[in-house]
Amino acid sequence: MTTEIIKILKVFAPSTIAFFIGLTITPVLTYYLYKYRLWKRQAGKIAPDGRATPIFNQLHKEREVGTPRLGGIIIWISTTLTILGFWLSARFWPTPLLLKLNFLSRNQTWLPLFTLIFGAIVGLIDDILEIRGWKSAGGGSGLSFRKRLTLVTLLGLVGAWWFYYKLGLSAINIPFWGELTIGWLIIPFFVAVMIVLFSSSVIDGLDGLAGGVMAIIFGAYAGIAFFQNQIDLAAFSAVVAGSILAFLWFNIPPARFYMSETGILSLTTTLTILAFLTKSVVVLPLVALPLFATVASNIIQLGSKKFRHGKKIFLVAPLHHHFEARGWPPAKVVMRYWVIGVIAAVIGMIITLIGG
């Protein structure tokens, strides 16, 4: 086989395998999710400012109870099994082909894989506490926002330290301009990006929304990494995308389960790593436009309520629930987010690849 064919096979074969692994393990997971009734005991949520969310709670009063959480397990389990499968195959049957297909490498995939698993574990703890009805200090259930933010910040500091001291990263690439050296400021900048993406986790609010958006974003980063000749990283991103598609197969309306924190937290934190490894963090708001629109709508809403004496810009935040509150069917909101997500991701890929 030629080198180019090997590269293509290295990206697409693991992604396809991850998809079918996800489809295979889902019936087993679904059985236990329903058998042990692993869903929220009470519908509704608390806003980031600690206030009630009556419009959201009215829209979702019958959706969150009776549908299991923890669906994100499919994503990180499928991804991990696929990576380990190719690594073990190359280790115990070191044929030339299997050695070339193994994409677990220290310089490209160790850090995103560690981040994926760490985020998944933190999210899993939060999900379990929420299912059990454990009350947080903020009045909601599960881990409080402050505790989750603290853990994500610590993870961001570890990642920033690795990039700055181990990989020597001290500059960000600005398309069509060049590298801007910021020195040690790369550390707080890295943490800030991870926190922003963590804040976008509320996009997991409609059937199929988070899964479709995330599959598009990770697919885009598979393409970016591939054309940058970071083939191991491209394979990793494609495997995550394949695993998300397996989850999405069962999450489209009516959802069999929700991704919940164990899925969305692992994906948003890992996305930060991919953006810095591909030197595309400046273009990240475009590649991941639906996520940043979600964060921006929350910030705008909170700012308006604080500085305009309780007046709101949106009927309910984040933005996708605003459209829902205006009467859009949830499926219409989801599919239009998918369309916008694809267009934005493609434009972001083009800018990243031709902008240098």
Image (cartoon, rainbow, N blue to C red):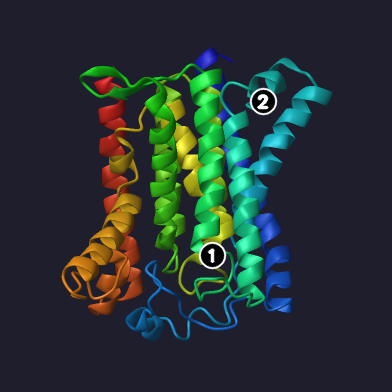
User: Residue at 57% of width from left, 69% of height from top?
Assistant: 257
User: Dot 1: what SS?
Assistant: loop
Q: Residue 70 appears at what percent x and percent y?
A: 62, 64
Total tally of numbered discs in the picture: 2
Q: Position of residue 192 (x, y in %)?
A: 39, 41
Look at the numbered discs 1 and 2 and tell me whether their residues touch, using CB distance below 8 Å: no
Residue 81 in which image quadrant: top right
Compared with 325, 94 (above or below) is above
Query: Residue 33: percent from the left, percent from the top?
Result: 68, 71
Q: Is residue 193 visible?
A: yes
Left or right position of 97 against 317: right
The numbered disc on residue 102 is 2
Q: Quadrant where the C terminus lies? A: top left
The picture quadrant where one finds residue 86 is top right
Query: Residue 263: x, y in percent?
Result: 56, 55
- Give how far apart the Cα atoms at labels 1 and 2 are: 39 Å
Q: Amino acid type of disc 1?
A: Ser
Q: Amino acid at mark 2?
A: Asn
Q: Earlier in the sequence, mark 1 or mark 2?
A: 2
Residue 9 seen anywhere in this rendered image of the structure: no
Q: For marks 1 and 2, give the one nearer the viewer.
A: 1
User: Callout 2 environment at 10 Å: few (<14), some (14 to 19), or many (20+)?
Assistant: many
Secondary structure found at label 2: loop
**Mark 1 closeness class: few <14, some 14–19, many ≥20 residues within 10 Å:** some
In the displayed structure, would residue 15 be above or below residue 324? above
Vertical side of 57 occupied by 231: above or below: above
- Give the left or right position of residue 120, taking residue 87 as reference: left
Task: Write the residue at 45% across / 85% down.
Answer: 61
Q: Give the residue displayed 55% in from the left and 82% down from the top.
A: 65
User: What residue did someone put label 1 on?
Assistant: 144
Residue at figure coordinates x 58%, y 40% from the top left: 115
